[in-house]
């Protein structure tokens, strides 16, 4: 659900940036209408609840098991990383990150397509 000041975080594993882009980015039909991405469908997120300009994603050079390594260079990292470290644990290694800003994920799907929903936290 759209919520100002909240970022929702997914961590996963992909082979390359093209695979991540294909999973996350909206597609368009011949008439220019947007088609929800596989990511949005997997997590039952209404594409009207997110703004494409506030989606951040990255594939890292190797797998990590720490928020500091996974989110280095992400927007608002100085606020988000300490909150995540204090409140959550990472139980496996990941090489990909999806961040949805101004969105609080409240769905029931926790894992899909090699991605795990981790948390929704304040970034302000």
Image (tube, grey):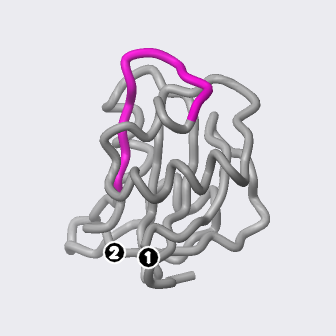
Horizontal side of 71 relative to 109 (left or right) equals: left
Residue 81 lies within the magenta run: no
Q: Is residue 8 left or right of residue 89?
A: left
Does residue 93 lie above or below 105 as drawn? above
| Circle on res. 51 | 2
Question: Of all residues shown, which one is farthest toward the top?
Answer: 62
Q: What element carries label 2?
A: loop
Label 1, on which residue?
Answer: 102
Magenta part of the protein: which range? Answer: 56-66
- Tell me which residue sits at (32%, 67%) in the image: 54
Q: Are marks 1 and 2 in contact (CB under 8 Å)?
A: yes
Left-right relation of 122 to 84: left
Q: Residue 112: x, y in percent?
A: 68, 44
Q: Residue at x 42, y 73 (%)?
A: 124
Residue at image coords 53%, 70%? 122
Residue 41 in picture, x, y percent from top left: 58, 61
Where is residue 105, by image quadrant?
bottom right
Q: Is residue 7 left or right of residue 88?
A: left
Q: Is 76 in front, or is 107?
A: 76
Q: Quadrant of the N terminus?
A: bottom right
Identify the mark nearer the N-term, 1 or 2.
2
Give me the C-alpha separation between circle 1 and circle 2: 8 Å
């Amino acid at each position: 659900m759209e919520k100002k000041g909240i970022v929702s975080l997914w961590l996963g594993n992909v082979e390359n940036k093209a695979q991540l882009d294909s999973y996350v980015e909206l597609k368009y039909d011949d008439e220019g209408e947007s088609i929800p991405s596989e990511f949005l469908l997997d997590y039952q997120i209404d594409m009207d609840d997110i703004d494409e300009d506030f989606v951040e994603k990255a594939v890292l050079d190797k797998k990590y098991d720490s928020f500091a390594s996974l989110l280095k260079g992400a927007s608002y990292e100085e606020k988000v990383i300490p909150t995540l470290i204090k409140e959550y644990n990472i139980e496996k290694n990941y090489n990909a990150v999806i961040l949805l800003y101004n969105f609080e994920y409240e769905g029931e799907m926790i894992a899909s397509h090699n991605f795990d929903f981790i948390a929704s936290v304040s970034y302000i």
